[in-house]
Amino acid sequence: KQRFTPHPVRQVVSTETAHILQDLMAGVVDSGTAKVARIDEVMFSGKTGTAQKPNLENGGYYSNKYIAGFGGFFPRKKPMIAGVVLLDEPKRIHYGGYTAAPAFAEIARRIVLLDKTRQNNNGRMFATESSATPDTHCTLESDKSGADIGSRKMLSDLLDPASNGTIQLDRNLEARIRDCRRKLENGMLPDLTGISARDAAALLSNRGCRLFVLGSGSIVGQEPAAGSPMQGVESISLTCSSRKGKGY
């Protein structure tokens, strides 16, 4: 077999800029567009992507065909593996954070599991990320509060045999979305407050109405009001805020 080894060509960005990007990409998984893909076994970072497919015959873009993607790396502190997952025309939900990112998480989990199994804790590829040494470049609120202290251990030691390979989702958010979906199926506009505009957009896709979003963060207001019949609704306005208020 022919082997290829990487060799540096030039430095594209400064070390400081790279650290800033690492922090931002960690935020994508911790509290951003890929938060549903976060797993306890592997602390990974990355960026989601969702793109309409081009119409090569007639020009422009398809309104109902998408490519979903996620590019990421792990371990966070001293990255060893990077990869990109692209899904051509994913079904039901087309956002990269809900499709490609969970696929990346599962790939990362299996790589770490394989590393632990084969190396038997000796000579493994992943360096120790000690919980006693904080990440000096991390500015995420969750890290400041110490909520992720336990997740800074060696990646191979974070494997949970009880997980059975499942992606651990935010259970509160999962329940909220299920409830919203049931109400939509019954022809009623659900209470969207507390979830993100992206989650709302995924729920309301293919409902025949336009979505207008003001602000960023979680939804704090909506028009029409929750409980309104969906029949005849042409547009829905959502007001979002990053301040902590009603949450789920």
Image (cartoon, rainbow, N blue to C red):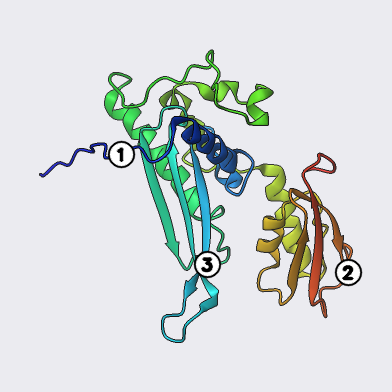
Q: Which residue is mark 3?
A: 91
| Foreground: disc 2 or disc 1 | 1
Q: Which residue is mark 1?
A: 10
Would you call the spot at circle 2 few (<14 residues within 10 Å), some (14-19), or many (20 or more)?
some
Up/down of 24 relative to 51, above or below: above
- Residue occupying image coordinates x 82% and y 68%: 188
Say which amino acid is labelled 2. Answer: Ser
User: Along the polypeptide, which appears first: circle 2 or circle 1?
Assistant: 1
Q: Nearer the viewer, residue 204 or 80?
A: 80
User: Does the image show residue 42?
Assistant: no
User: Along the polypeptide, which appears first: circle 3 or circle 1?
Assistant: 1
Q: List x then y, in percent, for residue 34.
A: 57, 47
Q: List x then y, in percent, for residue 224.
A: 87, 67
As measured in the structure, the alpha-carbon distance from the residue carrying label 2 to the one carrying label 1 is: 58 Å
Quadrant position of the C terminus in the picture:
top right
Say which amino acid is labelled 3. Answer: Lys
